[in-house]
Amino acid sequence: MTSATAPGKIILLGEHAVVYGRPALAVPVRQLGATVTVTSSDLAPAPTNASWLERISIYAPQVGRSGPLANFPVGSSPDPLAFVIKSVLDMLSVEPPWLHIQVDSTIPVASGLGSGAAVSVALIRALSSHLGKPLADEQVNQIAFETEKMYHGTPSGIDNTVITFSQPVFFIKGSPIQTFSVGKPFTLLIADSGVPAATRDSVADVRRLWEQDRDRLEVVFSCIGSLVMQARSAMRSGDLDSLGKLMTRNHALLQELTVSSPELDRLVLTAMSAGALGAKLSGGGRGGNMLALVQEADLEKVEMALKSAGSRKVISTKLG
């Protein structure tokens, strides 16, 4: 039996603009995660004519997958979990024995916390290790990124990158990742709006806006990119007041991109009124989660205010 885990993630600043070549900041959220366990079955050795789809079964109740992989689509529109498994087997050039794979996750689906990427990363690591050929981080990241395309259409690659390397990252699509340290620990509250939202849909809608009015959207993307650069400097120097203001300004620009929602806007305003240094939506938007940067003295007050305003769940995570 072999197990592997992967954390969730949250984007601090830069979502959507990162798809168009601007930078973004993201951090792992270790309070949430995916765990994959691979077990060799007690069944007799596979007959020579048994395909890999027949040899592998999966149990993943949180994502609605159970049964032999032979029941899952693997053609031109493959199931993401089947795609991950096939990609690992192809990269390792191995024929699998009878295997049972169990997937467990505490990361809410469609909430901007990287649930799909976390499951992919944990599955890649557990399967390759169980087969005796653990993949390097770069290889894990490569497969996870290809899988992200099935979930999000045109992903930036930030989810799979921050989850694979499990470190805060400064990310520009197509450029080497840059990790960095923060000058002063800080606390984020992650509040669930209670509204599920598919990142693929909001990414596609922003793409349509960009195609209709490229000049205006490019200006918005560049403004977001500038905020990201300033935020990285603020994090390095420990200037939390500036970081909070930059987060709030980023939310206003995301509203211009039409990816906020009444629920997210209400939570952002609530957090600010309760004393947060800054607040914004995180991830694809239209639902999912928002972030609030808070000082320790205001932590409980802001958390209670967010719950009173309708947040289904509030998670506290400390960075640095």
Image (cartoon, rainbow, N blue to C red):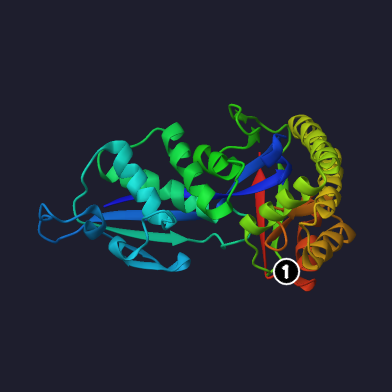
- For the point 83% across and 66% down, the residue is 266
Q: Position of residue 200 (x, y in %)?
A: 62, 55
Up-down: is 231 above or below 12? above
Q: Is residue 73 left or right of residue 114?
A: left
- Name the quadrant containing residue 55: bottom left
Q: Which residue, as the protein is rendered here, is positioned at the far right? A: 273
Q: Is residue 65 left or right of residue 289?
A: left
Q: Does residue 284 show up?
A: no
Q: Position of residue 104 (x, y in %)?
A: 43, 61
How many C-alpha atoms fall within 10 Å of the one at disc 1: few (<14), some, or many (≥20)?
many
- For the point 44% across and 69% down, the residue is 64
- For the point 79% across and 53% down, the residue is 280
Quadrant of the frame with the C terminus: top right
| 37 vs 149, nearest the viewer | 149
Per the image, label 1 sits on a secondary structure element best described as loop
Q: Which residue, as the protein is rendered here, is positioned at the far front? A: 212
Q: Is residue 138 left or right of residue 47?
A: right
- Name the quadrant containing residue 262: bottom right
Q: Does residue 56 show up?
A: yes
- For the point 78% across and 64% down, the residue is 261
**Kind of residue at disc 1:** Ser
Q: Which residue is mark 1?
A: 311
Up-down: is 183 above or below 216? above
| 188 vs 59, nearest the viewer | 59
Up-down: is 229 above or below 264? above
